[in-house]
């Protein structure tokens, strides 16, 4: 199956809208990468394949009326990233709504195809008059109008599509159905991305809670040391008060971080489409990748390199994943399907002005007919040709409306391609920045740990004691620097992994699966006469 039904521009559009990101990229090694290739491109491969849904997929016509709660057996074990995605594939609300819309489009396609079939109907009528009409003829009373009138009718018709109008309408409805099916793929891609992002935010909150707890333990240790030294008369009361302040602030950070954990897990449950109050336990197994080792992004930054750097050129790796996105994202294929449907609308408007032909057969049976016949059976067969001679300009107006629909669909397709290009550029830049930030924060934590160790040694040995200055200040500042460095490292690590997942979404790698109502791969977009 060919995926190159239409060509895409190789040069990204709107490349100047992320000026700050491009500038940051150059300051974090983009210049060195462009000029010397010393900093490799970030990993752009698939972060993790889509898992199989862990719950039976509900029928599109019978979605969950309430967000379900995982079984006790499932809740007994911590959920990995693949676990939460596997559940969301069956329970996500937006995915269920897209499948319901697809079911509606399928019904419209069936309705359009049914126009080719013969129709058979029957009518039963009963009429009662206030009085009948009876005439005496030759000594006999003959009723010409019955007081009660019963009639049974049968009608059958068969359309003959001599103009191709029915066939065109059916093709148009198929393209609309294709667009609806692709919307399921779009919803799937977005749902997986949303769940992964919420999962990473929950893990981030837990990791920051661990950092806050470590800071609290260290602050409590400093308080214990200060109280012992105060009793020994080595330090002033100020050291104890400062240590107590640090402990109180650390407690506040722990309480706040625990609240963020609870809120982020609730957000994850909502993104999955399960009961918000589900007590999920999470595991980071298989969810976290560390950035690959790379040369120092600041190593080759020279004035000449910065001056020669082109911020609009992100390299061959970006061009490759951008082309993959334009050939994969459901939004682009959905726009193409809608465009083809509107083009069928022009053909439909033209054929509505052609002659039409239909066959029909009607039969009427009156069991108690009036007059001289006790029963009456009549039928008629009709072959009807309709020749439109003058419609007052209605056909021309329909053609103009159809052309306007095509123009709007062309713009929508262009907008979809530009949107994918912009999202891809932003996602790629975010991944580069997250990769470089993670490398820098790793080094910062190493330095902060050593600084805290030295400050503690100096405090215990009395080296940091100065007249009029509390020796605890140096240790407290070192602890604050370490906590900040560790928090930045946690944020950088989760930013990096989240950026990888968002790049996969921007490419459209979560869009296609054999399970569910969407396509397993981008469609060929051929139907009707286009198959020939």
Image (cartoon, grey):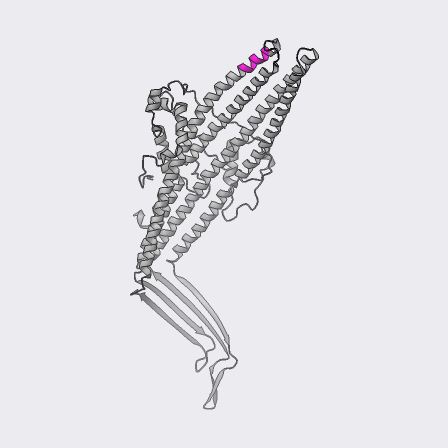
> For residue 454: magenta?
yes
> For residue 327: magenta?
no
Q: Is residue 523 visible?
A: no
Q: Which residue: 35% across, 57% down?
A: 166
The answer to whether 245 is drawn above or below residue 326 in the figure is: above
Q: Quadrant of residue 219?
A: top right
Q: Which residue: 30% across, 57% down?
A: 350
Q: Is residue 436 visible?
A: yes
Q: Quadrant of residue 416?
A: top left
Give coordinates of residue 97: x percent, y percent: 49, 46
The answer to whether 354 is drawn above or below residue 41 in the figure is: below
Horizontal arrangement in the rendering, residue 82 relative to residue 120 (left or right): right
Give coordinates of residue 488: x percent, y percent: 51, 24
> Mainly helix, strand or loop, the magenta region?
helix
Location of the N terminus by quadrant is top left
Front residue (pair 280, 72): 280
Give coordinates of residue 46: x percent, y percent: 42, 30
Residue at the extreme front of the image, as rendered: 468
The answer to whether 255 is drawn above or below residue 236 in the figure is: below
Front residue (pair 362, 376): 362
Q: Which residue: 52% across, 46% down?
A: 63
Figure disc tally? 0
Give coordinates of residue 153: x percent, y percent: 44, 70
Front residue (pair 470, 304): 470
Q: Quadrant of residue 364?
A: bottom left
Horizontal arrangement in the rendering, residue 223 relative to residue 312 (left or right): right
Q: Which residue: 37% across, 32% down?
A: 321
Give the magenta range: 450-458
């Amino acid at each position: 199956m060919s995926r190159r039904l239409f060509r895409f521009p190789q040069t990204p559009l709107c490349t100047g809208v992320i000026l700050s990101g491009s500038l940051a990229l150059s300051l974090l090694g983009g210049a060195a990468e462009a000029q010397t290739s010393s900093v490799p491109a970030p990993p752009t491969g698939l972060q993790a394949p889509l898992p199989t849904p862990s719950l039976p997929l509900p029928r599109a016509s019978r979605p969950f009326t309430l967000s379900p709660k995982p079984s006790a057996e499932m809740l007994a074990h911590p959920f990995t990233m693949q676990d939460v995605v596997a559940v969301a594939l069956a329970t996500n609300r937006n995915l269920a709504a897209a499948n319901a819309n697809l079911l509606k489009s399928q019904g419209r396609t069936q309705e359009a195809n049914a126009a080719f079939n013969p129709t058979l109907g029957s009518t039963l009528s009963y009429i009662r008059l206030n009085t009948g009409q009876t005439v005496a003829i030759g000594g006999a009373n003959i009723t010409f109008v019955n007081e009660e009138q019963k009639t049974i009718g049968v009608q059958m018709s068969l359309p003959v599509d001599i103009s191709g109008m029915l066939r065109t309408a059916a093709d148009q409805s198929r393209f609309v159905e294709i667009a609806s099916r692709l919307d399921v793929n779009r919803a799937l891609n977005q749902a997986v991305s949303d769940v992964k992002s919420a999962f990473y935010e929950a893990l981030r909150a837990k990791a920051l809670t661990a950092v806050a707890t470590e800071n609290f333990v260290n602050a409590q240790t400093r308080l214990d040391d200060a109280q012992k030294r105060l009793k020994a008369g080595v330090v002033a009361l100020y050291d104890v008060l400062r240590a107590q302040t640090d402990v109180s602030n650390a407690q506040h950070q722990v309480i706040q971080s625990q609240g963020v954990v609870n809120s982020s897990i609730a957000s994850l449950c909502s993104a999955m489409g399960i009961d918000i109050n589900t007590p999920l336990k999470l595991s980071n197994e298989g969810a976290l990748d560390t950035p690959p080792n790379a040369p120092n992004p600041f190593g080759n930054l020279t004035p000449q390199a910065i001056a020669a750097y082109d911020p609009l050129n992100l390299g061959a790796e970006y061009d490759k994943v951008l082309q993959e996105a334009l050939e994969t994202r459901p939004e682009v294929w959905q726009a193409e399907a809608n465009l083809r449907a509107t083009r069928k609308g022009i053909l439909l408007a033209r054929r509505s002005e052609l002659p039409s032909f239909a066959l029909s057969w009607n039969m009427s049976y009156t069991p108690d007919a009036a007059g001289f016949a006790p029963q009456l059976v009549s039928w008629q067969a009709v072959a009807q040709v309709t020749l439109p001679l003058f419609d007052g300009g209605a056909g021309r107006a329909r053609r103009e409306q159809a052309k306007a629909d095509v123009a709007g669909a062309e713009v929508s397709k262009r907008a979809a391609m530009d949107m994918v290009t912009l999202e891809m550029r932003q996602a790629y830049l975010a991944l580069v920045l997250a990769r470089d930030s993670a490398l820098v924060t790793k080094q910062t934590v190493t330095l902060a740990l050593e600084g805290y160790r030295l400050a503690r040694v100096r405090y215990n040995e009395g080296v940091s004691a100065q007249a009029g200055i509390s020796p605890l200040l140096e240790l407290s500042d070192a602890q604050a620097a370490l906590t900040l460095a560790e928090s930045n490292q946690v944020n950088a690590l989760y930013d990096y992994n989240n950026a990888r997942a968002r790049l996969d979404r921007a490419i459209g790698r979560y869009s296609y699966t054999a399970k569910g109502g969407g396509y397993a791969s981008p469609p060929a977009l051929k139907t009707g006469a286009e198959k020939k």
